[in-house]
Image (spheres, rainbow, N blue to C red):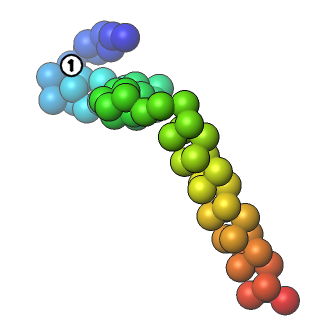
Amino acid sequence: MFVELRDGETQEHLLSRFRQTMQRNGVLREIKKRRHFISKSEIRRLAKAKATRRARKKIARATTRV
């Protein structure tokens, strides 16, 4: 992954563009995710908990709108 220096662009702006690119591509998120090993069963458990929260949120939104 690289970002080319544009004409008249400062190094600070180049660095900020690089950071934005990394953020958009999800590289930083992937690095944080891989920082510690998580077993497959733990991943499934976290995904199930996330789905439960999502469903609860959806129900809560539906009941407040009625």
The C terminus: image quadrant: bottom right
Q: Amino acid at mark 1?
A: Gly
Residue 50 position (above or below residue 12): below
Comparing 55 with 64, the one in front is 55
* Residue beneath disc 1: 8
Comparing 34 with 58, the one in front is 34
Asked whether residue 20 is in view, the answer is no
**Side of 13 relative to 27 (left or right):** left
Comparing 13 with 30, the one in front is 30
**Side of 43 relative to 19 (left or right):** right
Comparing 62 with 39, the one in front is 39
Local secondary structure at mark 1: loop
Residue at the left extreme?
11
Residue that appears at 54% across and 48% down: 46
Place of residue 16 in the rendered image (x, y in percent of width and height, measured from the top left): 25, 32
Asked whether residue 57 is in view, the answer is yes
Please identify the quarter of the rendering in which residue 61 is found.
bottom right
Place of residue 45 in the rendered image (x, y in percent of width and height, measured from the top left): 58, 47
Q: Residues within 10 Å of mark 1 (few under 14, many from 20)?
A: few
Place of residue 52 in the rendered image (x, y in percent of width and height, measured from the top left): 67, 61
Residue that appears at 37% across and 29% down: 37
Place of residue 26 in the rendered image (x, y in percent of width and height, measured from the top left): 45, 30
Residue that appears at 74% across and 69% down: 58
Please identify the quarter of the rendering in which residue 33 is found.
top left
**Side of 19 relative to 51 (left or right):** left
The N terminus: image quadrant: top left
Residue 42 position (above or below residue 7): below
